[in-house]
């Protein structure tokens, strides 16, 4: 193992193996059957302890797999200097600045896993995580957290109660401030855009969010098909009332407004009249084809059940129709 050519061949073979498949037994077999006969023209018996000691000297160690941070060297000082390139913009082009968003949650009982203790010393930690606080913030590469000074706020005519930074602290919980919703996210985003325009007057902001349900939520009056009712329903009973009217096209191609509601009159026992607004259900307002499709899928659920009816006929194949 002291020969330099043998060391290079062993190291080259070692790097071709996936880390989970590396073992001293595989390298011993490769060394005795291929490397030594090719380079030295002889076969020798090499112990596994010699191979392990050799790779310990090379900086390798046999250790348990853990989820660690991957370092690829992109933050080295020389790499950062080579990466700096001033943008060359045309006359009507603007620089784009990336702003990222995150919502970490911190608990009062958070603590380190590795601590200094004496041989006979132990620490009893609390079982629960404790109280929590969520921090929602926007970051940009040049200013880090989005924030401005009090002079910038007064210079642009903003009120004194306008926040100087986009960071928001939120105590989530039933008995605290409730739950973080898309409305809270929009309120923070509006303030973040104002701060961004002040500290980046000649840039276009590119805001990046993660895949959270609040970040992909629709407004309450959005025309979402999954929120439409199957049958007619009273307006006060709707969870998501559609306030905006839709539209359709007539036979000549002109736009025709389409209302989702209709009113129906009622009379009480004492003779008084009143009207109730209903929302058109999907089943009653669609054309005959979609009603047929709905009935087909509804009736198909009964096939696994032992139900006998006139309209349920057993055929030998789905490609053939019986004569009867």
Image: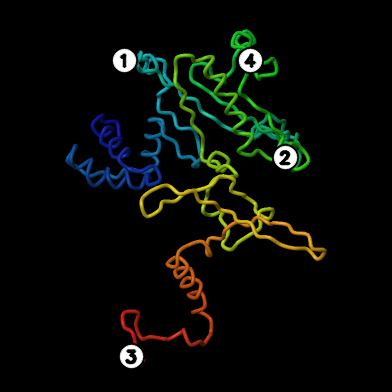
Q: Name the residue that disc number 2 marks.
A: 178
Describe the element under mark 3 as helix, strand or loop: loop
Q: Name the residue that disc number 1 marks.
A: 90
- The answer to which of marks 2 and 4 sits earlier in the sequence is 4
- Residue 55: x and y in percent read 38, 35
Identify the residue shown where x is 59% and y is 17%.
147
Looking at the rendered image, the quarter that the C terminus falls into is bottom left
- The answer to which of marks 1 and 3 sits earlier in the sequence is 1
- The answer to which of marks 2 and 1 sits earlier in the sequence is 1
Identify the residue shown where x is 81% and y is 66%.
269
Q: Hey, which residue is sitting farthest bottom in the picture?
A: 324
Disc 1 to disc 3, how far (Cα)?
76 Å
Disc 2 to disc 3, how far (Cα)?
65 Å
- The answer to which of marks 1 and 4 sits earlier in the sequence is 1
Disc 1 to disc 4, how far (Cα)?
33 Å
Describe the element under mark 2 as helix, strand or loop: loop
Q: Hey, which residue is sitting farthest front in the picture?
A: 271
| Mark 2 Cα shell of 10 Å, populated few (<14), some (14-19), many (≥20) | few
Describe the element under mark 1 as helix, strand or loop: loop
- Residue 186: x and y in percent read 59, 32
Disc 3 to disc 4, how far (Cα)?
82 Å
| Mark 3 Cα shell of 10 Å, populated few (<14), some (14-19), many (≥20) | few
Asked if disc 1 and disc 3 are in contact, CB closer than 8 Å, the reply is: no
Checking the image for residue 309, the label placed there is: none
Q: Name the residue that disc number 4 marks.
A: 158
């Amino acid at each position: 193992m002291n020969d330099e050519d043998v060391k290079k061949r062993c190291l080259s073979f070692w790097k071709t193996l996936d880390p989970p498949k590396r073992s001293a037994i595989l390298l011993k077999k490769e060394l005795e059957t291929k490397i030594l006969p090719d380079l030295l023209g002889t076969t020798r018996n090499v112990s596994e302890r010699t191979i392990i000691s050799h790779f310990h000297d090379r900086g390798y160690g046999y250790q348990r797999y853990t989820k660690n941070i991957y370092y690829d060297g992109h933050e080295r000082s020389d790499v950062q200097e080579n990466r700096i390139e001033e943008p060359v913009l045309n006359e009507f082009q603007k620089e784009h600045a990336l702003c990222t968003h995150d919502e970490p949650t911190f608990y009062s009982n958070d603590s380190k896993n590795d601590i200094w203790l004496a041989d006979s010393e132990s620490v009893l930690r609390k079982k629960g995580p404790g109280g929590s606080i969520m921090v929602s913030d926007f970051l940009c590469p040049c200013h880090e957290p989005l924030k401005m000074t009090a002079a910038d706020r007064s210079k642009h005519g903003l009120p004194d109660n306008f926040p100087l930074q986009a960071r928001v602290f939120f105590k989530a919980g039933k008995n605290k401030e409730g739950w973080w919703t898309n409305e809270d996210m929009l309120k923070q985003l509006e303030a973040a855009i104002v701060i961004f325009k002040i500290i980046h007057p000649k840039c276009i902001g590119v805001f990046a969010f993660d895949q959270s349900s609040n970040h992909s939520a629709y407004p309450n009056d959005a025309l979402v098909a999954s929120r439409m009712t199957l049958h007619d329903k009273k307006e006060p009973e709707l969870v998501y009332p559609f306030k905006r009217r839709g539209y359709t096209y007539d036979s000549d191609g002109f736009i025709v407004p389409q209302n989702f509601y209709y009113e129906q009159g009622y009379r009480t026992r004492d003779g008084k009249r009143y009207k109730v607004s209903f929302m058109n259900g999907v089943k009653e307002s669609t054309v005959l084809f979609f009603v047929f499709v709905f009935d087909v899928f509804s009736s198909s659920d009964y096939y696994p059940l032992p139900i006998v009816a006139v309209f349920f006929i057993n055929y030998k194949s789905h490609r053939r129709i019986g004569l009867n």
